[in-house]
């Protein structure tokens, strides 16, 4: 059993999912963990600092026993740009906006998608056939609130790209953040 398999077994044995295991130059060993996903559990659970400390302590002992050479161990949560690697990740985040990079370009010359395009951002969906996955997007620029729409503006079509997991080089949740602050209270929430 390799040390990577031992790390995965330790993380899953403590009740977490191993999202990523990365070893980089300079002796950094980065372990990314997440809470297990249960489709029956509507409330999403998040990784805490205490969870990371717990995994760090266990892995320090394990890596010493396995005689793995590293200078620094970093354990963290996947963050807002979480990588998607397994079928279960895609099922979990269906309906979310994701970024994918394909292994090979998929467009066709003269089509709506450039022939050499590999990167796409869109909403992850399961096609009606139930086979594979698809992302749906529009290349229309985002309109500013209150902006008037020209009568001459052309409607930009919605595009759909079907893919299988083996065609993907990398897939991540799109890091969409709003810096607008708190949203307005819905009507009817006023206090009397």
Image: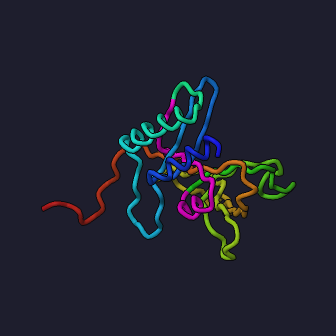
Q: Residue furthest front?
A: 65
- The quadrant of the picture occupied by the C terminus is bottom left
Q: Residue at x 68, y 51 (%)?
A: 120
Residue 25 rendering spot, x and y as whole percentages: 64, 26
Q: Quick check: 191 above or below 53?
A: below
- 55 vs 92, nearest the viewer: 55
Q: Residue at x 52, y 43 (%)?
A: 32
| Relative to 35, 190 lies left or right | left
> Quarter of the image holding residue 87?
bottom right
Image spot of residue 48 (x, y percent): 38, 45
Residue 79 in the magenta stretch? The answer is yes
Q: Which residue, as the protein is rendered here, is positioned at the far bottom?
A: 129
Quarter where residue 191 is shown: bottom left
Above or below for 185 versus 8:
below
For the record, the magenta segment spans 73-96
Where is residue 142? Give x, y as percent: 57, 51
Residue 152, position as x, y percentages in the image: 66, 58
Q: Is residue 185 left or right of residue 131?
A: left
């Amino acid at each position: 059993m390799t040390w990577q398999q031992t790390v995965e077994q330790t993380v899953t044995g403590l009740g977490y999912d191993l999202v990523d295991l990365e070893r980089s130059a300079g002796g950094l060993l980065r372990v990314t963990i997440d809470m297990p996903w249960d489709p029956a559990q509507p409330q999403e659970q998040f990784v805490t600092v205490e969870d990371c400390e717990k995994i760090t302590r266990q892995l320090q002992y394990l890596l010493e026993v396995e005689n793995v050479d590293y200078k620094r161990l970093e354990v963290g949560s996947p963050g807002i740009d979480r990588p998607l690697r397994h079928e279960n990740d895609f099922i979990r985040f269906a309906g979310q906006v994701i970024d994918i990079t394909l292994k090979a370009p998929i467009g066709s010359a003269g089509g709506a998608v450039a022939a050499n395009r590999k990167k796409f951002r869109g909403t992850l969906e399961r096609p009606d056939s139930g086979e594979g996955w698809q992302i749906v997007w529009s290349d229309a620029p985002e309109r500013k609130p209150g902006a008037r729409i020209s009568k001459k503006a052309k409607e930009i079509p919605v595009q759909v790209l079907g893919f299988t997991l083996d065609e993907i080089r990398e897939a991540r949740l799109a890091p969409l953040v709003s810096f607008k602050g708190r949203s307005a209270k819905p009507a009817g929430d006023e206090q009397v």
